């Protein structure tokens, strides 16, 4: 895992924590990871998140959500789309619909990080960071 791909790192940590049913997971805090965590929270995929620690050591503590009596992770899949080696950009008309609208695509736009739905509504495209469902 390249140390500079904070998004992939974040997705892997959330996926792994969900696989072993952890209540929370810690992710190095950057502007990008905070924005993605906010989108995930607003869309109801995670509980809440808070910043802990000082300076360079800041972490985002993300509380995960589970459903059913077997505590299945609410986030079934996290898929990185745009990678440092191969960026994926789409204009507003080409934005993907994840599982026909059941999932979300997280898009990095000139107006910040948002879901494919919001970006479509605002008529802006951007870099397709990942799919969540």
Image: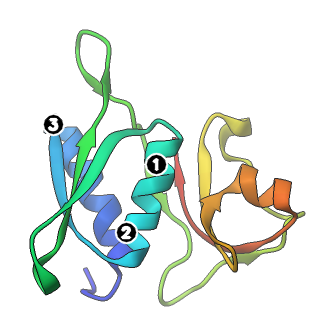
Which residue lies at the image location 31% right of the left edge and 65% below the top edge?
10
Picture coordinates of residue 54 (x, y %)? 10, 77
Helix, strand or loop for disc 1: helix
Which residue lies at the image location 27% right of the left edge and 39% below the top edge?
64
Helix, strand or loop for disc 3: loop
In this rendering, position of residue 25 left or right of residue 123: left
Q: Quadrant of the N terminus?
A: bottom left
- Marks 1 and 2, Cα distance to the nearest angstrom? 10 Å
Picture coordinates of residue 15 (x, y %)? 29, 50
Cβ–Cβ below 8 Å for labels 1 and 2?
no
Picture coordinates of residue 121 (x, y %)? 84, 53
Which residue lies at the image location 70% right of the left edge and 55% below the top edge?
116
Total tally of numbered discs in the picture? 3
In this rendering, position of residue 32 left or right of residue 48: right
- Marks 1 and 3, Cα distance to the nearest angstrom? 16 Å
Quarter-of-image position of residue 82? bottom right
- Any mark on residue 33, and which? 2
- Any mark on residue 23, and which? 3
Quarter-of-image position of residue 56? bottom left
Q: Which residue is mark 1?
A: 40
- Circle 3: is it few (<14), some (14-19), or many (20+) Cα within 10 Å? some
């Amino acid at each position: 895992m390249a140390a500079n791909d904070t998004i992939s790192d974040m997705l892997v940590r959330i996926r792994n924590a969900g696989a072993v049913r952890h209540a929370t997971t810690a992710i190095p805090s950057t502007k990008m990871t905070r924005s993605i965590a906010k989108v995930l929270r607003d869309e109801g995929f995670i509980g809440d998140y808070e910043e802990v620690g000082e300076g360079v050591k800041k972490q985002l503590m993300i509380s995960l959500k589970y459903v059913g009596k077997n505590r299945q992770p609410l986030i079934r899949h996290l898929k990185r789309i745009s990678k440092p080696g191969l960026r994926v950009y789409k204009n507003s008309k080409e934005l993907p619909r994840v599982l026909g609208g059941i999932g979300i695509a997280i898009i990095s736009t000139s107006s910040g990080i948002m879901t494919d739905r919001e970006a479509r509504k605002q008529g802006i495209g951007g870099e397709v960071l990942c799919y969540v469902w």
